[in-house]
Image: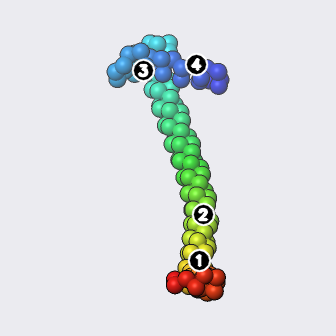
Amino acid sequence: MTEEEARRQEAVVEAVLFTMGRSVETRELAAALECEDAEAEAAAEQTRKEAEAQKEAAAKEAEQIRTDAQKEADHIVHTAKLQADRLGREAADLYVRKVREADDHWNKIPGDLEQVYDQHQGLREMLKMIGNVNV
């Protein structure tokens, strides 16, 4: 039997099984294939093997797609974690800078108050000298 005849028989077997929608007896396949029962049984077995091979190939392809998708997802998560770490460090650095700035301002307050007091005292002295005002 040529490869073309084998493909034709496989197509006929698939068509009969699909259209009948139920189990088909060997004699029914033989009638559709116009051959002996043994040849019809061999064609049905070959069709089953082909279908099984296609199923296995599809399962392998699906597994490969799943694996590739998982690798991509892992890469995205890794990249996101790196970005989050970087942003977290930047946020922490900004927080520390702001705390230090606030601390610097807080530490300047006594000096600023002292300066204002000194200016006030200077003004009091000036006012006393000018008008002998009691302040």
Label 4 – label 2 distance at C-alpha: 64 Å
For the point 59% across and 23% down, the residue is: 7
Location of residue 52 with respect to 30 vertically, above or below: below
- As helix, strand or loop, the secondary structure at mark 3 comes to helix
| Residue 22 seen in the figure | yes
x%, y% of residue 44? 47, 27
Q: Give the number of the mark in front: 1 or 2.
A: 1
For mark 1, give the secondary structure.
helix
Q: Which three-letter amino acid code belongs to the residue tagged 1?
A: His
Which residue is labeled 4 in the image?
8
Q: Are marks 4 and 2 in contact (CB under 8 Å)?
A: no
Q: Amino acid at mark 4?
A: Arg
Residue at mark 2: 87
Residue 17, numbered label: 3
Q: Picture quarter containing residue 102? A: bottom right
Nearer to us in this view, 33 or 78: 78
Quadrant (top left/top right/bottom left/bottom right) for the N terminus: top right
Disc 1 to disc 3, C-alpha distance: 87 Å
Question: Nearer the observer, disc 2 or disc 3?
Answer: 2
- Circle 3 packing at 10 Å, graded few (<14), some (14-19), many (20+), is some
Amino acid, disc 3: Leu
Give the alpha-carbon distance from disc 2 to disc 3, as whole Å. Answer: 61 Å
